[in-house]
Image: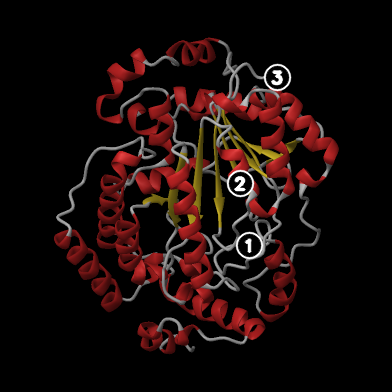
Amino acid sequence: MFDKTFCSSPWFHIRLTYGGNFEYCRWSYRPDREHNIKDTGIMQYYNSEQMKKLRLDFLDGKMPKSCSSCYYEQSFDKLTGRIRQLHKSAIDVENFPLTFRSSPHYQMFLHSYNNNGIGNYYPVDLQIELGNICNSGCIMCGPTLSSKLEKDYKKLSKISTLFQDSANKINNWSQDKTLLEKLILELNSFPKIQYIHFLGGETLYQDAFYDICDQLIENNKAKEIIIGTTTNGTIYNTKLEKLISHFKEVHLGISIETVSNLNDYIRYPSKIQNVLANIDKFLELRNKNNNLYLSLRITPNVFTIFELDKLFEFMIEKNITAESCDILVEPSCLRMELLPKDIRNEIITKFENLIHKYQLTKTHLVNERRKDLIDKVIANTIIDYNSFIKKYTQPKDIEQQRYNLVEWLKSFEQLRNNSILDYAPRYEKFLRSYNY
């Protein structure tokens, strides 16, 4: 059981959330309300009671509830965050016992086991979320991650009980110059940082992203650091061009699930033609910078999964890789598991045709960010989603969730004066049967 549950992440990774709270994992969402950047440093949180307990839980073979998303995806043989982090510790899940003992982090695990969970290292892999400032209001997102949705939810909460108005304004900690300087000072104190992933909101929209990068460059830290960030594709900021050459690598993920105008409904008010034009600009930038790695970050929902095959063909055509994010579980009414049987079977047929057309096969990959592996990564992602759609179990409350789906859509449509039927006509019969 130990080999199925152990994760090495809490020995070298920490997440700083949009509101300045600390969290132990980029794939979990259980922010520690007791530890905020206002009064806690990164290293203080690194050996907090929460982190020490998590290390001991993993060493005791326990399965923390907050890690359920990884364990759920693991049940479908999907590449999970846990497997990615084990790879950073040189641990292979296919040969776990031997590689666990030979891991360069083994002495760190042993130290924590013998010292009540205390870590004797420091974070070299960070996720820094800069706040919720964003120009998009994606229907599967929420006010904590989008300033546009923060405003919308105040109206939506009066339309439906499915939406909860945030009583207090979201705390965009990075707009506080004192806190930003505090973070930069501590980052510069670390002997080594391997990777920093920045998130928003919309990162390319936020000055704090460029401020942190500029300071890492000025302090001669950047050349040894890989930075990554995710954009919604609506923005191309030339400031990014000036940063790339200074860092070891730059990983830019573009959030997208469809290349049709369904994007304009799901990721309102973006326009797919603008997004595609910006992707071409990023591809041109990649051609000029060998250290720039691009990916399309996909988190399909009940609607966009129907068009995912077209996005995969777009990836193949453009030679840009897929990066599969978590399987969407919230909002629960947008989960892929709500698909009706006929549409579900149609999606499977689309994937099977794609797999046959390109003769795709599954390969064992963990390090996906290599330009010579783009075709293999795309193949793995297609096969993984095909497997998920075939194998998933419908939720017990599926009928209620389908009614919630219609209520969710109609609430947004009152604000935006649009209709899902204009963007996803194949779903009309299904939606009408749940009072659309």
Mark found first going from the N terminus, 1 or 2: 1
Crowding around mark 2 (Cα neighbors within 10 Å: few <14, some 14 to 19, many 20+) is some
Is 154 left or right of 421, judged from the image as shown? Answer: right
Tell me if label 1 and label 2 are in contact, CB under 8 Å: no
Tell me if label 3 and label 2 are in contact, CB under 8 Å: no
Snapshot colouring: secondary structure
**Please, what secondary structure does the residue beneath circle 2 have?**
helix
Residue type at tag 1: Gly
Label 1, on which residue?
142
Task: Where is residue 252? Give x, y as percent.
Answer: 51, 47
**Please, what secondary structure does the residue beneath circle 1 have?**
loop
In the rendered image, the vertical position of residue 146 relative to residue 97, given as above or below: below
Label 3, on which residue?
189
Residue 200 seen in render: no
In the rendered image, the vertical position of residue 352 relative to residue 420, given as above or below: above
Disc 1 and disc 2: Cα gap in Å? 26 Å
Label 2, on which residue?
240
Residue 229 seen in render: yes
The mark lying in front, picked from 1 and 2, is: 2
Task: Where is residue 264? Give x, y as percent.
Answer: 52, 75
Please give the name of the residue rendered at 70% of the width and 35% of the height, measured from the top-left corner: 214
